[in-house]
Amino acid sequence: MRKIISLVIIFLIFLSLFKVNLITSVKITDNLIFKKFYSEEEAINSVKLGGDKGGTDLFLNPLSNSSLINDTNIGFYLAPKGRIYTILLNPVPKSASGKFNPFEFKEIRFAMNFLAERKWFKDTLLRGYAKETFSPINEFDVDWTKVADIIESKLLKDDISFAENIINKTLTKLNIKKINGFWNYNNETIKIKIIFINNDEIRYAYALHISNVLKNLGFEIENVTLNSNEAKNMIYNTDPKELKWNLYIEEWIFAENLRYSEFKVAQFYASWYGFMPGWNFQNYWNYINSTIDNLTSKLLIGDYLNEEERDDILRKIIQMGIEESVRIFVVQRTEIYIYNKERIEGIINDYTNGFANKINFLNIKPKKNKDKPIVVAYLQKTEDSWNPIGGNLDPSNNFIFNLISDNPYLRNPYNSSIITWKVKTEVLNSSNKPIFNMDDKAIYWDSKEKKWKYVQEGKKVRSIIKYEIYYNKWHDESEMNLYDILYWFYFLWEWSNKDNEIDYKYNKYIELFYKPFINLIKGIKIVNDNTLIIYSNYYHFDKNELSYIFPILPTIPWQIILATEELFIEGKASWYKEEAKELKIEWLNLLNSTQSNWISIILFNFQNKNYVPDALYEGEITSISLEEVNKRYNNTIVFIKNYQHSIISNGPFKLEKFDENELKLFLNKEYNIPTIDFNKDIKEVKINILNIKLKKSLIKGERQEILINVTSDLYELNENYFKLFYIIQHNNGKIAFTSYANFNKGIFKIEFSTIDMEAGLWYVKLYYYTIFSSIPSIKNEYFVIIELNLNNTITRPPINGTLIETLPPFNSTPLNITTTTPTSLNTQPVIDYPTLVIIILMIAFIAVLILILRKKLL
């Protein structure tokens, strides 16, 4: 459960590389209705009907499979950077649990890479709408070119025989033997507990398939059947040494595209981040790899000299993460999103989140019956509570809150570039070492003395960034201002630091999720009411990364944060679900009318006492006026009375009406809309590799020349905008070259000598990238190197290869999930028969030619 909120926090504050010019104004639809459904089938049927006829206009969630589209009114978009499925293994050793656990051993965990049956998962369960993936970084990430050779060289393909050999050798060395076909330790069959998710058809079928694979290799399988919420609670809230589970199929939903991979590799591989077994809880057994932890920490804060050293750190993390194999990466889905094409227009589809992106809902409009509001169908799949600090865990709820709240920036849905929205930034200074002095008027919140203090003289920082903020009114008519920003920073500093054993303003979960970021900030200088300068110890070689790392813009006003603090201190509610369960109190929910009335009562009492929070007057800041404080209290009290909820934010839409199954959002007339034309500035650029010309066979020592003809549907080909990365790899996994192809007159060219390359089958793996899209065009080719021995005879190369995989055509054939018991065979596809015949004939022709030449020379 905690992983999703962390993803949301991290991804909403991260950034990308390129900026988009802002030119003309946006016309936003006046209101939106979100209808909650409890089955996918009902939601789809409502989209068929249309929002103007009592149904809905689009479905916010991706479809579970492609067979559900069978109506001419329904249109669809594909989002190729969808959910990622991983296998999480419990690596707890016998010394901690008292029980034998095969996944204690790194060799057996690594063998699971070859038992993952990725191709079966992709083709059978997802009908080809996915790509196989082997690490946190894949071809859709800008960092792929930095680590591709490491991942590709490991040949992490489906190979049950290879995995079986590793397992047999490992267990045999431990003097463990098979009895009646099952591995036996101390007269007990070795058992693997696998979690089956009974309300997730895909993960249930995959768990069943993997259990059959492992059973076939001699392990007894115990099926632990739970629903998704029960499974998350068992996995992420229990001590691994209890061995309640050995293997769990994870599903990761990303909130936003990332330009770089610092956060992603830390989240998936580092124990300190809290998502490796043990979850960084002090009283639990924790999986710890100190080298990975140190490297991910250095990567995250920018503790490196230059981009080359940064890339080297990243490569080491990926190498060790794959070798440790506590988490096995399986596939990334291509998601399918549907809408009623007769009813709405102007859809902008995000490559990661599909329709669930703010730009889409700022741009879509009714196509007919324009007086009718746009109606959106959604499913809530996760137990959730509406609060932006430790709630909003369900992707649908989180997105709806994102429409209600404001953002410092938006992200281009196709290439992840930054679109300046409500915060303009300027990097004044940055260095990989702390060499810059802080201004003596910079302040920080001292959680011990409970006041704002000037920073200590002589302290130096790595970066100095200026933020110019454009405020909106809060939905309760309060004017947003500098005090909201300061209170947000106070809250993070105060509640993430434990100053003594009885510190009542400390929360271990806020420390866990926010302290790594707030600790990087060393001081804040107030320039004027809407301009701040932040001094920090964060660094990134790409200066654009520095600007948006910190959550500068709060999504709820200071008086709501203040009231939630009081609810926690009084023992009524916690921001976090886990803590609420521990303390037997409520999980904070701003949509809950009872809790909202608690907030109203707290603010009413503060108003009567003329109470001013310390963070708004103590220390080196200009104190807020009592008049403004009481006006804030009153505005919120009136809002809660009128709307019976306390979701007060500052975004383009305001939540006015709601019940258990429906939320009605109305355009916030006070919202200051930045000037931009989404339809003109945001375009989907499609690229394609048209054809590849190369010599299919060469005698060792000859030069290979590869010509690649490419195309783009929007921009003139230019080496500044388009690049082609390539890998030349032998069938045995050895990589000869990785680099970028030369570009000349619309053609990419790769040229090299084969003198130092061994005989055999070689693959040419091509990745055609453009800065306008995060999705490359990928193609594979191959050639054969033939070597003459001393007798002038030909060494025949082995023939075994992987064919190019492409996305299948979209169709509506029903998905029938079946599970078969795999055989212990190498499941990699081989070269097709006609190609094999051609290669053999070419080899024979070359042999005859050489013999003729030899006779002439003699």
Image (cartoon, rainbow, N blue to C red):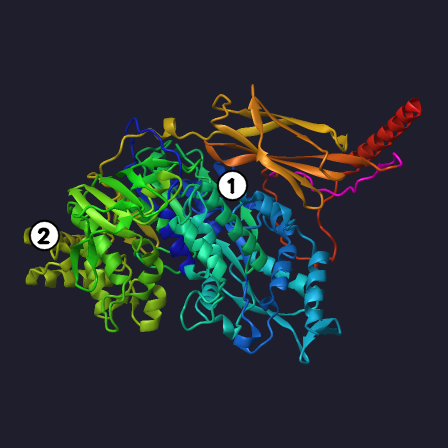
Amino acid identity at mark 1? Phe
Instruction: Give coordinates of residue 471: x percent, y percent.
Output: 20, 41
| Residue wearing tag 2 | 623
| Image quadrant containing the N terminus | bottom left
Q: Which portion, as a residue range, is magenta?
A: 791-807
Please give left or right for residue 310 compared with residue 521 in the image: right
Q: Of callouts 1 and 2, which one flags the residue occurring earlier in the amino acid sequence?
A: 1
Q: Position of residue 105 (x, y in %)?
A: 61, 66
778 vs 852, nearest the viewer: 852
Characterize the magenta stretch by its predominant secondary structure.
loop
> How far is the residue under mark 1 from the one under mark 2?
49 Å
Q: Secondary structure at mark 1?
A: loop
Number of labelled discs?
2
Q: Which residue is mark 1?
A: 140
Residue in the picture at 6% in, 62% down: 608
Using the rendered image of the protein, determine whether residue 379 is visible from the camera's viewpoint: no
Numbered tag placed on residue 295 in the rendering: none
Q: Residue at x 38, y 56 (%)?
A: 5
In the image, is 29 to the left or to the right of 685?
left
* Residue 524 percent coordinates (x, y): 22, 48
Q: Position of residue 579 (x, y in %)?
A: 33, 68
